[in-house]
Amino acid sequence: MHLNLTILVERWKVLSLFGNNGTLILLHKGLNSIKKASKYDLVLSPQFYISKREKLPIKYAFQAKKVAPSILEEYLPSEYGYEYIVLKDGDSWLFFAYSPKDVEEFLKSCCNINPNKINKIYFADQLKPILRKLPIGIDEKNALTLIDNSATIVPRSMLDSDRYAKFTKKLRPKQSFNFKPSSKSNSDNKVSKGAVFTIISILLLSVAFLAEALSYKKAIKVEQESLDKIYTKYPELKGKLIRDSIKKKYENIEKKERAVRELLDKLSQLTSKKSILDKVDIQNGKFTAQFRVEPKEIKRVEAIATAANLKVKRINSTLLVEGVLK
Amino acid sequence: MSKSGLYIVVALIFLIASILFSFTQKKEYYKSLEVVKQERQELEKTIALKELWSAKGIKSKMEKILNSIPKAKKVNYKYKRGRVEFKLNSLTDKEINRVLSKLAKMPIQFKKLLITRSGDNFILECLCVW
């Protein structure tokens, strides 16, 4: 049972989040403190708005809203910025005008609430269904009641009633209106300390990444410059085709001449007192070498030659080494 | 959106752009480094080979080696622009070893190298270019 209740409460919280409702306040000039909340929905008392009922041959709300300023004109000072709201009530239209600036200034002065915390607004005239039954007590001396079918704040002493309805969130009228701030509110314009810290941190991080990027860019330039220095010294190597051709030419020479020198080294390993060199001929990439070897030594010399990858032919006591330079 | 929120969003966009820029530069650096490294290696190898096989002063070094052999043993010496052809007669074991090892250490190309034994001595015929 307890678990079910908890689930229900949580669901209600989630739904209220989706509904985006704030704490409901009845705003009247006697208000001096409000419980702290993240958002407030205000029921404006008649002290904060002017209303008028008119029977007009108008079908749609947007048409009624267009004529609202001219209908309420005579009640409002011209220099003030008013917001107009219209509501269909039976066969007539209810016109409301309120000053967002007044509401903002009052909330700031009485309860230190910033305008960005105001969520939705309602008008006390929307509480008529309750006010027809009972007046709503707004403080110890005053109450909200209906006079000539209009919500009005009057001293309790003027009322005959002994019972007063308490203003709670259950009294929330069905239709709400979005509060339109007088201008960009100060709090919106002000950048909070936390935001400044976050922005500076993000910017510092960005600068670090930018510095890193620029250092990479510089490093690329340094590498390229070191290469350019070499090309300045050897301009003939700048073209890839020429460079490749020069490289190939010298690689071939290197390969061939290394082979000649290695061969001379190998042939010198085959010579001894018992293995005498008779002839060496190296020409046109081929070579032949002739050794006169004592019979007992032939196998040993042959083994050395084979180990050195030389092709050996034996003719009596003569060893013939021949091959192609690779 | 509040001013703070807007500034934070702008700063975040700036941060993302910086990260992307840095990432691109890093990638480009390593790519470029690889290309430059390869090109430099190739270049240095080519330069080293070129400097080795087209070194200057070969002629004088060659004459110095041949001058160490008695004149009587030296026949048929011809020099023509980076090309030497010579024949050395009656070289002892020591002499032929010395001449050959010195020639082998020089950056010259052996177009012809003929060693023939004649009794206890050797005849060396050689055509070198550089």
Image (tube, grey):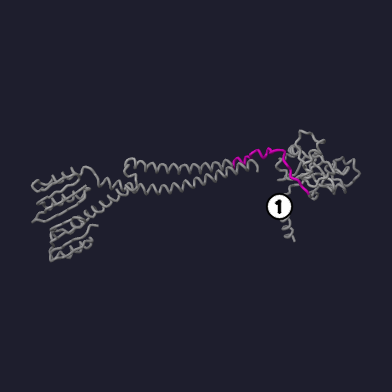
Q: Is residue A281 left or right of residue A228?
A: left
Residue type, numbered disc 1 = Phe
Q: Position of residue B11 (x, y in %)?
A: 57, 42
Q: Specify the quadrant that holds the C terminus of chain A.
A: bottom left
Chain holding disc 1: A
**Mark 1 sits on what residue?**
A18
The residue range painted magenta reads A175-198
Report the side of A209 relative to A110 (left or right): left
Of A193 and A181, nearer the camera is A181
- Identify the residue shown where x is 34% and y is 45%: A239
Residue visible at 15% across and 60% down in the picture: A290
Indicate the quadrant containing the N terminus of chain A: top left, top right, bottom left or bottom right: bottom right
Q: Where A29 sits versus B107, above or below? A: above
Residue B108 visible in this rendered orientation of the protein: yes
Residue B96 shown left or right of residue B4 in the figure: left
Q: Is residue B59 left or right of residue A209?
A: left
Tell me the SS state at disc 1. helix
Q: Is residue A140 above or below residue A303?
A: above
Residue at point 42% right, 44% down? Answer: A220
Residue that appears at 54% across and 41% down: A204
Confirm whether residue A25 shows in the render.
Answer: no
Residue A222, quarter of the rendered image: top left
A92 part of magenta stretch: no
Residue sitting nearer the eye, A13 or A101: A101
